[in-house]
Amino acid sequence: MSPTPPARRLRLGLPRRVFSQVLLMQLAIAAGVAVLATGLFLAPLSHQLDDQAMRRALAIAETTAQNPQVAHDLQNSAPTVGGPVQKEAERIRKETSAEYVVVMDVRGVRWSHTDPKQIGRTVSTDPTPALAGRKVMQIDTGTLGRSARGKVPLYDDDHRIIGAVSVGIAYDSVRAKLIDAIPGLLAYAGGALAVGALAAWLISRRVQRQTRDLAFSDIAALLAEREAMLHGIREGVVALDRHGRVRLLNDEARRLLGIGDEAVGRSLDEALGEGRTTDVLAGRVTGTDLLTVRGQRVLVANRMPTDDGGAVATLRDRTELEQLGRELDSTRGLIDALRAQDHEHANRMHTLLGLLELEMYDDAVEFVGEVVGDHRATAEQVTEKIQDPLIAALLVGKATVAAERGVALWVSDRTRLPDRLVDPRGLVTVVGNLVDNALDAVAATPHARVEVELRAEGRTAVLRVRDTGPGIPADQRDLIFTEGWSTKQPPAHGKRGIGLSLVRRLAERQGGRATVGEA
C-alpha cells in the first residue's frame, strides 16, 4: 500500500510581480477610501436630517402658535374631539404632513391629538420648558413612538402664556430619507471606486513597463548586484542626469577624479572645475577612448547616453600603462643604441686587431685612448654639472640614444645642479619627455642638435630644452599642453598627446610652470 502523500498547504500572500502588488494595494486603498468617505458622509447626513426634521417641527409649531384663532379657541372652548382646537390642529397636521399637532393648556392637558382618545389627557413628555417660555427641539419617544419634536409656548392677546403647541415629525420618515439617500451615495462611491480602479490599473501598467515586470525581490537583488558591481570594479563610473548633474559615483571614480560625495547633485563644472576632463564627461568632446589628465593620472574616458536624457561615463586609469609605454620606448631606444654600439665596438676591435697585426703599437694605444676618452668625457661632463644621480644617468643615456639617431645632445655650460632634488622622479619625467620630443623634432634633419640647460635658482630648478627643429607655430603654442594634442603618429602601445600635459601638471604641482618659446 503506497504511503499517503502529504497534504499541501494553501499559502496565501501577495503576488510576486510589482505590477500585481501595486494594483492590489491601490485597489485596496481606493476601496478603503470609498468606504471611509461613505461612512464619514453618512454620519453627518443622519445628524443633518434629524436637525432638519426638528426645525421643520419647530416651524410648524411656531406657525400654529401664532394663529390667534387657536389661542382664542383654547380660552373659550372645552377639550373635546369635535372642538375647534382639534379641528384646526388636524387641518394643520394634514396640510403639513406632520405626525401630530398637539395643543395643550398650562396644565399639560391635550386639546388636540391625532388619536382622539388622548384628548383631555396629560401629555406623556415634560411640557415645562415650553410652558416656561422656551422653544424646544428634540428627538423623543411619546405615545406615537419616536419622533422629531418642536415645542413652543402659546400666548394670548396680552402676551401671557396660556399653553403650548407640540408638533412631531415621524422619525421613520427621517430614517427613510437617510435610507433613500444611501443608494445614490453608494452609486457615487462605486463610480469613484471604478475611476480609482481604472487609474490604479493605468499606473500599475506604467510601473510594469518601467520595472520590466520584475518582482520586488528581483529589483532588490538587482540593486544589491549593482552596488556590488559599481563598487567592486576597477573602473570609474559617473552617472549624470539630463541636466548634467552628477547623480552617482562609484569608489573608483572618486579615487580617479579626487572628489567625494559632495559632488553628487552638482554639475560637472562645479564638481571638477573647467578643463578637458569636464568637457569629456559632459559630452562637449566626443569620441571613444578619449584621453584626459586629472592630477597626475592619465585617464581614458568613454561616455554613453541613457534613455532618460542623462549619460554614464566610464574612466580607466592609464597612468601605469602610459608609463610602461614610455619605458618601452626608452628601452627600445637604448636597445637600438646598444645594437649600434655593438656594431661600432666590433668595428673598433677589428681596427685595433689590424693595428696590432701591423705592429703599429703606438697607433693602437692612441686609438684606444681616444675611444675611452670620448665616453668618459661625456659622462664626466654631465656628472660634474649635475649632482643628482637620476638626472645625470638619464642625460647620459639620452646622449647615447641621440648619438645613435644622428643628433648631438649637448649639456649647456650654464647647467649647474649642485644638490639632490626633492622630487627627482618628477623631474626625470619632465626631462625625459622634453628631450624625447626634441629628438623626435630634429631627427632626420641636417646638423641636428638638442641642448639641455638645467640649473638651480635658490630652491627652484630651471630647465630649458632647445633644438634645431622647425619649432611650434605661434597659433598652436597654447595647444601643445592640451591632453590628446600631438603632431606625431600614435605609437603601437597607445595614443599620443600625454607627455607635455604631464610636464605642465608636474610643474604646476610644485608651484612652477611650463611654457614654449621660439628658440
Image: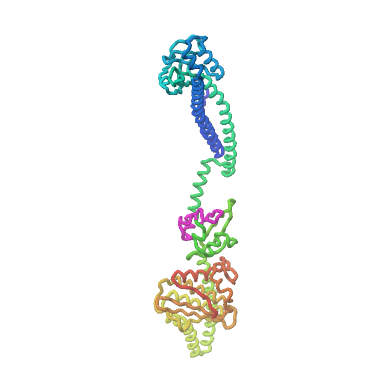
Give the colouring mode of the picture: rainbow
| Coordinates of residue 238 in the picture (x, y in percent) | 52, 56
Quarter containing the C terminus: bottom right
State how many labels appear.
Answer: 0
Q: Name the residue: 45% across, 83% down.
A: 414
Q: Is residue 468 shown in magenta?
A: no
- Determine whether 271 is above or below 504 in the image: above
What range is drawn magenta here? 236-265
Work out whether residue 346 can be spotted: no
| Coordinates of residue 287 in the picture (x, y in percent) | 60, 61
Q: Name the residue: 59% across, 74% down.
A: 475
Instruction: Answer left or right for 333 relative to 160.
Output: right
Nearer the observer, 355 or 516:
516
Nearer the observer, 23 or 437:
23
Work out whether residue 282 can be spotted: yes
Q: Is residue 243 shown in magenta?
A: yes
| Coordinates of residue 41 in the picture (x, y in percent) | 51, 30
